Image (cartoon, rainbow, N blue to C red):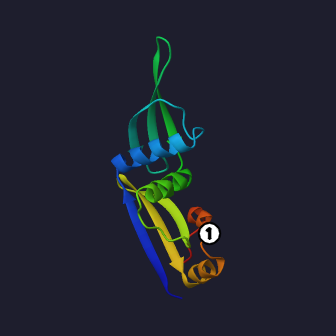
C-alpha cells in the first residue's frame, strides 16, 4: 500500500514562537512569564520561564512531552499558512537540536478524508505511525 511521508523541522526559534503563540491561545499550557530558553532534549522539550512577583524573580524549568507539542506545532503551521493535510497520522519527535512534525498519509487515510469532507478538527489527529 503506497503512502506519503512529510516532515516539517522546527528549530529553537520556531519552537519558541510556537510555544508562545500556543500559550496565548491556551493559558493553561504554561504559566505566563517571560520565555527565556527552549532546549530540545531526547525525551522532552525543556522550557525556561521567568516568573516575577513583587520583589522576587524565579526561573522555572518546564518539561513538555513531544506528544503535547503536537497541537502547538499544528497551530503554528496553520497560523503561518504552512500547508498541512487534514488526513494522516501526525506525531512529533526530536532529531538533533530540532523537533520534527511528521505526517504519514496512507491510501486509507486519504480515502476516509475524502468521504468525511472538510472537517479541520482532524488536523490534530495523533497516533502511531503504520509500518
- Quadrant of the image occupied by residue 117: bottom right
- Quadrant of the image occupied by residue 109: bottom right
Neighbor class of circle 1 (other Cα within 10 Å; few <14, some 14-19, many 20+) is few
The location of residue 24, given as percent across then percent down, is 51, 40
Q: What residue occupies the far top of the structure in this picture? A: 55
Q: Is residue 46 toward the left or the right of residue 13 in the image?
A: right
Give the quadrant of the C terminus: bottom right
Residue nearest the viewer, comparing 7 with 110: 110
The location of residue 53, given as percent across then percent down, is 50, 17
Q: Is residue 113 above or below residue 71?
A: below
The location of residue 51, given as percent across then percent down, is 48, 24
Residue nearest the viewer, comparing 114 with 48: 114
The location of residue 15, given as percent across then percent down, is 40, 48
Q: Is residue 57 toward the left or the right of residue 30 in the image?
A: left
Q: Is residue 126 visible?
A: no
Residue nearest the viewer, comparing 131 with 12: 12
Q: What residue occupies the far right of the structure in this picture? A: 116
Residue at 55 percent across and 55 percent down: it is: 67
Residue nearest the viewer, comparing 114 with 28: 114
Q: Is residue 107 visible?
A: yes
Total number of numbered discs in the rendering = 1
Query: Which element carries disc 1, helix, strand or loop?
Result: loop
Give the quadrant of the N terminus: bottom right
Q: Is residue 11 above or below residue 4?
A: above
- Quadrant of the image occupied by residue 89: bottom right
Residue at 50 percent across and 71 percent down: it is: 85
Residue at 49 percent across and 69 percent down: it is: 103
Q: What residue occupies the far bottom of the structure in this picture? A: 1
Give the residue at mark 1. Answer: 119
Amino acid at each position: 500500500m503506497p503512502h506519503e511521508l512529510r516532515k516539517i523541522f522546527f528549530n529553537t526559534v520556531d519552537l519558541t514562537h510556537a510555544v508562545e503563540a500556543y500559550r496565548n491561545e491556551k493559558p493553561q499550557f504554561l504559566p505566563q512569564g517571560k520565555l527565556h530558553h527552549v532546549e530540545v532534549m531526547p525525551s522532552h522539550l525543556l522550557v525556561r520561564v521567568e516568573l516575577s512577583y513583587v520583589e522576587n524573580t524565579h526561573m522555572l524549568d518546564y518539561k513538555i512531552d513531544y506528544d503535547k507539542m503536537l497541537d502547538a506545532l499544528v497551530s503554528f503551521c496553520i497560523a503561518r499558512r504552512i500547508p498541512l493535510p487534514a488526513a494522516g497520522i501526525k506525531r512529533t519527535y526530536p532529531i538533533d537540536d530540532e523537533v520534527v512534525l511528521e505526517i504519514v498519509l496512507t491510501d486509507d487515510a486519504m480515502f476516509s478524508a475524502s468521504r468525511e469532507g472538510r472537517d479541520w478538527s482532524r488536523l490534530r489527529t495523533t497516533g502511531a505511525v503504520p509500518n
